[in-house]
Image: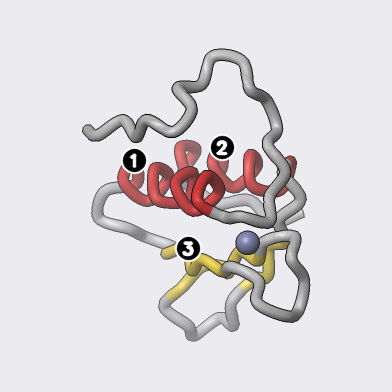
Amino acid sequence: MIRHPNKEIAAAVAEAVAAGWRVEKCPPRAHCWAVLYCPAGERGACKFSVYGTPRVPENEARKIRRALRLCPHTPPADTSGGASGVPVLG
Ligand SMILES: [Zn+2]
């Protein structure tokens, strides 16, 4: 299991994995750290490139969570405590 050096991002990636997303490590020389693929599989899967050293890790983690939320292929994990349909803008 690969783990992102930043704990905010590692936590967001762990949420994605828990939701069924796949993590594929980028080649050593790539700018990205890994690419996340949603559970849709090969065809039409959502993907998200995670940077290894983003300027603002919290934003990167937030973008990962947003990608999870927006993905139509990810089954809703937990409905408690979430404001459904109402985007919370920072
Ligand atoms: Zn998807």
Q: Residues within 10 Å of mark 1 (few under 14, many from 20)?
A: some
Q: How is the image coloured?
A: secondary structure
Of marks 3 and 1, which one's residue comes earlier in the chain? 3
Residue 72 point in image, percent of width and height: 61, 55
Which residue is the site of mark 1?
A: 58
| Residue lying furthest top | 81
Badges 3 and 1: C-beta atoms under 8 Å apart?
no
Q: Residue at x 46, y 73 (%)?
A: 32
Q: Residues within 10 Å of mark 2 (few under 14, many from 20)?
A: some
Q: Amino acid at mark 2?
A: Ala
Residue 40 point in image, percent of width and height: 74, 66
Badges 1 and 2: C-beta atoms under 8 Å apart?
no
Q: Residue at x 39, y 43 (%)?
A: 62
Q: Amino acid at mark 3?
A: Val
Q: Amino acid at mark 1?
A: Glu
Which residue is the site of mark 3?
A: 50
Real-space Cα separation, disc 3 to disc 1, in angstroms: 12 Å
Q: Residue at x 59, y 47 (%)?
A: 13
| Residue lying furthest front | 85
Q: Residue at x 64, y 47 (%)?
A: 16
Left or right, 9 with respect to 13, comes to left
| Quarter where residue 51 is shown | bottom left
Real-space Cα separation, disc 1 to disc 2, in angstroms: 11 Å
Secondary structure beneath label 1: helix
Of marks 2 and 3, which one's residue comes earlier in the chain? 2
Residue 1 point in image, percent of width and height: 77, 54
Of marks 1 and 2, which one's residue comes earlier in the chain? 2
The quarter of the rendered structure image containing the C terminus is top left
Q: Indicate which disc residue 11 carries.
A: 2
Real-space Cα separation, disc 2 to disc 3, in angstroms: 13 Å
